[in-house]
Amino acid sequence: MSMPGPDFSPPGGATPPPPSVPAYPLPPPAVPRRDGPGRSLALVGLGILIGALVTAGIAWWLRPATTVTVPPPTQRTAAPPTSAPRTAVPGTAGPGGVWVWGDYAYTGRGPVNQLDPAPAALPLDGVTQVAPNMGGGLALLKDGTVWAWGSNDHMQLGTEARAEALYPQPVPGLPKDIVSIAAGYETCLAVDSSGHVWAWGANQNGRLGDGNAGGLTIDQGRAVPAVVEGPADVVQVAVGYAGVFAVTKAGDVWAWGHVDSTGLAGDGVLPPAPIPELRDVASLAAANGVAFAVTRDGSVYTWGTNGDSNCLAATPSGLGPGIPTPVPGPAVKQVAAGDGFTLLLGTDGTVRSCGDNQYGQLGDGTTTRSATPVAVRDLADVAGIAAGQIASYAMTTSGEVYAWGGNTAFEVPGAPAADAHPAPVHVDGLRGLVAIAGGPSASAIYGVQG
C-alpha cells in the first residue's frame, strides 16, 4: 500500500517556480522494456544478418587459391646435427672432449675455412679414442658407438652418399659395443667386445680383408661395415697403406692386404692369415709400407718395404725385410708410425725416433735423416706419442703436449711458421689429456681431454 506524497503547490493555484538543478548528476532515466511483435522482428533480422556473415566467411575460405611468389630464404651455414652428444663451446673441451689442431679441412668442427693457430674443441664429448683418417676421422664414445666426419669419397662415413660430413655423425651398421677403432688411407676398422673386426671404406690393396684388391675409384669401397672373416678375439687393429694388422687377446698377429707389407708369404693381395713369427704381442703400428709389433716384454719387431723408417741400420734404403725382424735398443711400450719416420716410446718415459727428418720430425735438433733411432731432445715422463705426416707429438704423464717437426699448417701450435722445428715445443693451453692421436695419412692431430 502506498501513501500519497506531500503537496508542494503554492497556495491560490499559482504557477510553481522551476525546480532547482541538483548539485550532483541524476541517474539516467530507465529504458522502457520493449516486448511484443517489435522485439520478435528485431531478433529475426539479427539472425538473418549472422547467417549472411557465416555464409560469406565460408565462401572466402573456399575461394580459388592465389599464386604468390615468395623470395627464397637467406642461405645459412649448416648447424651441428641435433643427434650429436654435445655442441662444444669454441675454445673449450670438457671431460671426454676432443681438441684438434693442424690442417683445418675436415676436422669435424664445421665449415672452417682458415687455419687456427691454437687447438680448438671438436663438437663431441664422452670420447675414449680418436682415429684420424685421410680427410677426416673416427671417434669412439663411452657408450660403444662410433662417430665419423670428413670426406666420404670411399664411403668411410659408412654411407653410400658421397657428401662430406662437416660435423661428427654416427656410423650406421655397427654394433653398439665397439671397444677399439683404427683408420687410415680412407679405410676404417672397429673391434667389438666379442673380438670381431668390422671394416668399411676404401679397399685399395685389399684392406677390407675380403681378398679383393679394390682400387682408387669411389665405387670400389664399401659403405656397410662387415666382419672380417678369420681373426677372432682381437683387441687392437692398425691400418697401413698396403696392409692391415690385428693383435688378439693371446698376443697373436693377423695380417691381410698386399704381400709386400703383410709379413706373409704369398703373392699379390692376401686374405687374413696369422703371422707365424710373432707371439706375445701387446700393440701394433703401421704406415706406408712398414709395420711394427711391440711385445709384452718391450721388444720391437718390424717388417715391410719402407727403408729407414723401420729403424734397422742394416736395411738398405727402400728395401725392408719381408718377415718380422727385431729392432735393437731398450725396452719400448709404444710405437707411432708417421709418413716416412717412426717414434718409439721407451718404458723409461723417453722417446727415440728414426727415418726421414726433412722437417725436424725426429726431434734431435737436426734435419738429418737417421736409419737408427736417435734420442728426442728435452723430453721426460712421456706417457703417449703420436706421429703425423710431417710432425711428431708427445704427451706427458700430466697430460701436457709437446710438438716438433713441420709447421706448414700449425702442426706445431705456438711455434713460428717455419718449415722445420727440430726440437720439442710446448703446446700451450693443453693439460690433463689422456690420449693423443695422429696418422701418416692425416694432417690434423687430436687430443682427448681427461
Image: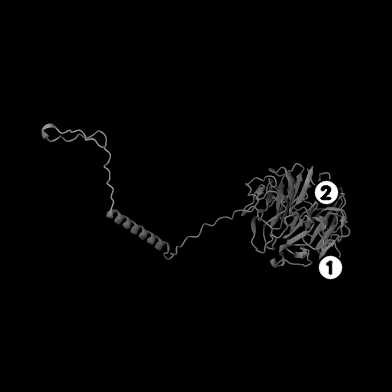
Q: Position of residue 48 (x, y in %)?
A: 34, 59
Seen at 54% across and 57% down, the residue is 75
Q: Nearer the viewer, residue 84 or 51?
A: 51
Q: Position of residue 335 (x, y in %)?
A: 81, 51
Instruction: Please state which amino acid type lies under the numbered disc 1.
Output: Asp
Seen at 25% across and 37% down, the residue is 2
Name the colour scheme: one colour
User: In the rendered view, would you say 425 is above or below 186?
Assistant: above
10 Å crowding of disc 1: few (<14), some (14-19), many (20+): few
Q: Nearer the viewer, residue 161 or 170?
A: 170
Which element carries disc 2, helix, strand or loop? strand
Which element carries disc 1, helix, strand or loop? loop
Quadrant of the rendered structure where residue 219 is? bottom right
Quadrant of the rendered structure where residue 134 is? bottom right
Q: CA distance from mark 1 to mark 2?
A: 33 Å
Quadrant of the rendered structure where residue 200 is? bottom right
Q: Position of residue 293 (x, y in %)?
A: 84, 54
Q: Position of residue 17 (x, y in %)?
A: 15, 34
User: In the rendered view, would you say 92 is above or below 327?
Assistant: above
From this viewpoint, is residue 365 visible? no
Q: Quadrant of the N terminus?
A: top left
Instruction: Please state which amino acid type lies under the numbered disc 2.
Output: Lys
In this figure, which residue is indicated by the disc labeled 1? 267
In this figure, which residue is indicated by the disc labeled 2? 333
126 relative position to 234: left or right: left
Task: Compare marks 1 and 2 and give the one earlier in the sequence.
Answer: 1
